[in-house]
Image: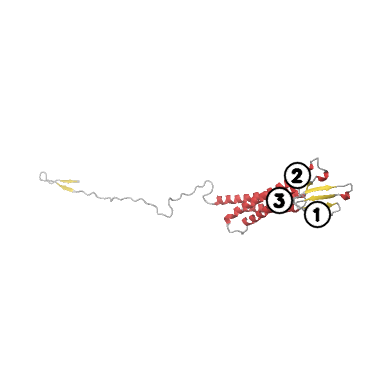
Amino acid sequence: MPSAGVEILGMILAVTGWLGVMVACCLPMWRVVAFVGQNIVMAHIIWEGLWMSCSVQSTGQMHCRIYDSMLGLPHDLQASRALTVTALLLGVVGISLAVAGAKCTNCTRDLASKPRLVLLSGVAFVLSGLLLLVAVCWTANVIVLDFYNPLLEETQKREFGNSLYFGWAASCLLLLGGALLSCSCSCSRGGAGAGSPGNGPGTSAPPHPASHGSHAHTPSYSHTPSYSHTHYSAIKTLPVNGHERRDYV
C-alpha cells in the first residue's frame, strides 16, 4: 500500500532527525571562538555548548568544564537549552506513538485508532522540529548581531559551531518526517473511504425500503363476483287476445 511506504519513510526521517537533536544537544559546539596570539603555539579554540564549555589547545589537549550555574549563561543559551530538551521529549512521544500506530506493528488491538496515533506522532515531530529550529535560529541571530557589533572586542565575537548545523539539519528532517506521517494518515483514510461500496464519486446509494423487518402493507380490494350468464326474471302479465305476454327484465 502506498500509505504504508510513506509511513515508513516518515518514521525513518523523523527518527534520524531526533538523533540529530540529541547530537546537537550534547555536542558542546554551539558557539566557537578562536584566540590566536603572536606565537602560534599559544593559539586555542573555545567551544561553548548548552551544558559545558571546552578549550582546545593548539597541541591537541582539550579541557571541558560543566557550567556551575544555569542562571550565569547568556539568555540565548538558556532558551536554547529549554527548547532543545522539550524537542527531545516531544521526539520520544512521537516515536512511541508512531510505533504504536504503525501498520506493521501489533502494539494495539484497536485498528481504528492506528491512524489517529500516526497523526498525533506526526504533529509531535513537527512541533519538535519547530522548537529546535527556534532554538538554533535564536542562537545564530545573537552570534550574527554580536559579530557585527562594533562595540565588542574581537575576543568577544563568536562564530557558528557544528551544533547549529546539526540542529538545522535535524529540524528539517523532523518537519519532513512529521509531514509525511500526517500525509500517510490522510491517505489511508481516503483509500478506505474510496474502497467502500457506494462511497465513491458518482455512485448513488441504493434505495432503501420504507420499513425494515416489518411486513409490507398490501392494499385490500373487494372483489365483486362476476356472472358469466345473465339471469332474467320473467313477469307474468295478463293475457292479451288469448295469448300470455311475458315481460323479461
Asked if disc 1 and disc 2 are in contact, CB closer than 8 Å, the reply is: no
Residue 184 in the image, given as x and y percentages of width and height = 62, 51
Q: Which mark is residue 142?
A: 2
Q: Which mark is residue 82?
A: 3
For image coordinates 87% across by 50% down, the residue present is 42
| Distance between mark 1 and mark 3 Cα atoms | 21 Å
Asked if disc 1 and disc 3 are in contact, CB closer than 8 Å, the reply is: no
Q: How is the rendered protein coloured?
A: secondary structure
Residue at the extreme left of the image, as rendered: 242
Precedes in sequence: disc 1 or disc 3 = 1
| Distance between mark 3 and mark 2 Cα atoms | 17 Å
Circle 1: residue type: Cys
Q: Is residue 246 left or right of residue 86?
A: left
| Distance between mark 1 and mark 2 Cα atoms | 23 Å
Residue 117 sits in which quadrant? bottom right
Residue 15 in the image, given as x and y percentages of width and height = 69, 54
Precedes in sequence: disc 1 or disc 2 = 1
Q: Is residue 164 left or right of residue 115?
A: right
Badge 2 element: helix
Residue at the extreme right of the image, as rendered: 39
Asked if disc 3 and disc 2 are in contact, CB closer than 8 Å, the reply is: no
- Which residue lies under the disc numbered 1? 64
Q: Is residue 2 visible?
A: no
Q: Residues within 10 Å of mark 2 (few under 14, many from 20)?
A: some
Give 185 or 54, whichever is nearer the viewer. Answer: 54
Badge 1 element: strand
Circle 3: residue type: Ala
Residue 30 in the image, given as x and y percentages of width and height = 76, 49
Residue at the extreme top of the image, as rendered: 150
Precedes in sequence: disc 3 or disc 2 = 3
Q: Residues within 10 Å of mark 3 (few under 14, many from 20)?
A: some
